Image (cartoon, rainbow, N blue to C red):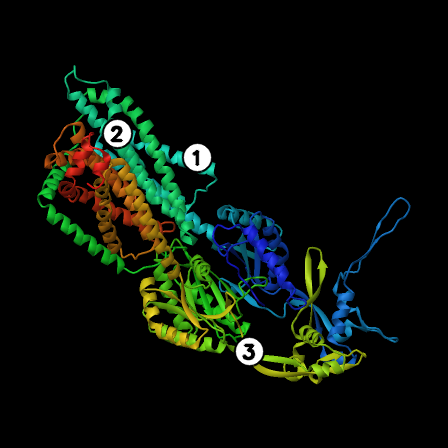
Amino acid sequence: MSVIKVEFGWGTDIYRNRQVVSEKLQLAKERLPEGVAPSMEPISSIMGQVQIIGLSSKTGKLSTADIRSLADYKLKYDLLSIAGVAKVIVGGGAGKQLQVVMDAEKLRTFNVTVNDVASAVTRNNQNRSGAFINIGTKAPAITVTGLLTNKAELENAVVLPHDLRPVRIRDVADVQFGPAAIKVGEVGVGGRPGVAMIVMKQPGYDTIRLSKEVEAALELSMAGMDEDLQINPHLFKQADFINRAIANVEGAVRDGGIMVVVILFIFLMNWRTTFITLTAIPISIAVTAIVFSVLGLSINTMTLGGLAVAIGALVDDAIVGMENVYRRLGQNIRLDKGEQRPAIQVIYDACSEVLRPILIGTMLVVVVYVPLFFLTGMEGKLFSPIGIAYIVSVTASLFVSLTVTPALCYLLLPNTMAKGEIKDTFVVRKLKVIAEFAIRNSIRWSRTVLATLVVLVGIALYLLLTAGSQFLPPFNEGVAQINLVLPPDTGLATSNAYGLRLEKLLIKVNGVKYVTRRTGRAEGDEHAEGVNSSEVIVSFDPTVERDREEIIDEVRTRIGEEFPGVAFAVDQPLAHLLSAMLSGVKAQVAVKIYGPDLETLRTVAKDVEGRLKEIDGVKDLMVEPQVLVPNIAIVPNRELLARHGLAVEDVGDTVELSLGGEAISRLVDGRYAYPIVLRLKEANRRSLQDLENLYIRKHNGKLIRLGDVAAVQQTMTSNNIKHENVGRRIVVQHNVAGRSLGEVVADVDRALEPVRQDLAKKGGYSLKISGQFEAQQEATKRILVLSVLSFLCMILILYMHFGSLNLSLQVMASIPMAFVGAVAFVIITHQTLSVATLVGLISLGGIAARNAILLLDHYIHLMKAEGKPFGPDVIVLAGQERMVPVMMTALTSGIALIPLALAPGQPGKEILYPVATVIIGGLISSTLLDFIVRPAVFYRFGRKAASRAADPEVSRQESILT
């Protein structure tokens, strides 16, 4: 069997791609041997395996053959009728066959060949059409109904005519129903033989809905079936992981919202102002849901994650607007009656005062999330929904702050102010005292402060670069996958025995709920594994409070002890498929060796394996099993064949029909269609001599031994040959545990440098390290380039606002200040540099710059609108007056993320956890340093730029460089 996998770029039209492949297949057919008909699999993806359903007998009354028939002819078609199901792969048991078991001695006695028997079967089992006949005014169709209806009809079919007594099939063979004689796979369910059904979905269909429909269909199908049949649809379900993930992220959104309420009330101690601010959350989420509905976008784990990240930021604009209105109304109330302005005018002026900072701040946040839309591959699919949800919800909150917030302020606040409720809360008063102390000392020790910041940024950069790296944090699927690979020449019976031992071993591990196993492959499965390979899916029990890594470590240890010297790998199903999607190999790291000679490739692969064994962190090391295995070669003698009027095809047909168990026809019984299979009985196919004694009919009707026209000899041949981009290759693969992916790959690269140099000398050979590390490097480069472009756009937006490059860069100084805290939290939480960490870092840039705009804008406002001179006093006053919105926006944005940061291993939070921790750490450092470093920066470098910005007569051109 040969399997070809064609990979297209992300975002391409799957139907057009299939059309292109179909056209190429038509061209290739012309160059293929007769009888070879390549076909495409139904539309699905490598991640389309949505469910594994186990079928077994409760008491053992039902045989696996009976169960297999139910699966093949009933359950499979019930599931295929569901919209969205692309394919149902049935494995295990043995399909029921009508077997024609021929006796070699009887064949010789009656002068019959296996080809004669095959011809008798096909000639006596067919319907034919005779077009139609005109009878009067009617034209009935003519049909010859000749399909077999039972076993007896086949037994009585004539093989050779004879005057006295014709030779029938029953004379030379036993005809019987039985399980498939040749099997390529076995299945275990919970430590017992069983049958498994793998449901593959079409792209674009909802996995949760599809799983519900599958289970509903199974429930209907069970009606009227044998009560001894046990169906377990929970062995593996992507829907379980998705449901847990959605529930966890929904909980994070809810808990984050509650924390935002608490923070707002602590600062404001006023139900009116708290209510005004909080209205931004439900309205923004509602608007986001409407936008998603209009655009046809789904609410999934990652879009909910975007809302979870944004939940605290949704009140930021409302906080800034409401706080300024509240403060300005308080100042208005303190004026004499004759000097007081109408409340609506005060509210309008207060909102206008912060309008530009709010707009610019939101623009910056949007700009930093735009790079997520340019990520490609798996990372793009994961993170772009976060960006969409964040941008839509934050933009909605901007409109709320510009419309709903001022209206509510007018309705709820003026009467409150008239009653004299204008005092700062206790918390605010204390924070203002601390802020003044920090700001004055920052200005006093400005050189020391700036030097310290430079040192901290340098340390943070060093720590981040040495923290290790990985592509994505591991998912917590609640399921593990174990692949056990025996030597390639191992038979199915032996592999099945090993697999059964492995099942019974795993079911005893504390925390394991279900176990299912596939040894070999199922018929029709494109994952063409040899019979020496077993794949076990282990579902964990969510009620057992045990860490996933702890269970996997125990599994690795037990397998190593039970099967010493046997190659195995432990991973998770989705992670396993993710690796295959990235590199074509189901492991985190794949060392691919390319070259023309298979023996050289095998030798190099063994050398690579030996070098990698010594590297700490390399787990599940395995060489792709491309080895020489015993083979019986039948080599026709063309001269002898020609002399007897025979062709190679005659030899091939004889061997195939005698030994291969080829289905040549079928017996239809209602909805069941049993293959009719020819084969010599077991006693006639045990030696090379048995093969030589097979008979072929010559053109003159006489028989000749196969051994007289062909040589039968034992040889060695390759069990498996892999190609990539039309070149031969072999893979040495491994996973990583105990160290970061980046650290291990760096050691692997150093260890393989001598091998790489040797291959370069050979010519035509090369070595490449592929897998998740390669994807991580490509994603990191893309994110860094996009981040630079994003930050340049931020500077442009800031320059358009301030009209000063100096002030624009002062705002951008928030990024290194945030970077310090972000890296500190990466180190404290024992994380590594991943794509998720980088997404958190670029997200942090816009959030941190938002608060810097509030401070710098207020510095200039006090100088411009209130005539305050540049100096420490105006910096202190601006810091105190903007301290509340700065602290509140930072705290709401940060604390709302705590639910995401508290349980890193929970499904749904794996990717959001690094994003949340980075943002929390960055907000802590940037907010604190806004009152320690920013005053020093502004005092030392902002005098000229601020004075010119505050003086409307100074042209923008003069302030470009100040």
Residue at x-position 40% and y-position 74%: 760
How packed mark 1 is, by other alpha carbons closer than 10 Å (few <14, some 14-19, many 20 or more), is: few
Relative to 80, residue 255 above or below: above
Mark 3 / mark 2, whichever is N-terminal: 2
The residue at which mark 2 appears reads as 322
Residue at mark 3: 717
Q: Position of residue 864 (x, y in %)?
A: 18, 29
Horizontal placement of 259 versus 583: left or right? left
Establish if 196 lies above or below 953. Answer: below
Q: Are dots 1 and 2 in contact, CB under 8 Å?
A: no
The x and y percentages for residue 876 are: 13, 36
- Could you say where residue 874 lies in the image, as x and y percent from the top left? 13, 34
**Residue 501 visible in the shown view:** yes
Quarter placement of the C terminus: top left
Going from N to C along the chain, the mark reached first, 3 or 1, is 1
Circle 1 is placed at which residue position?
290
Q: Residue furthest top?
A: 338
The image's mark for residue 942 is: none
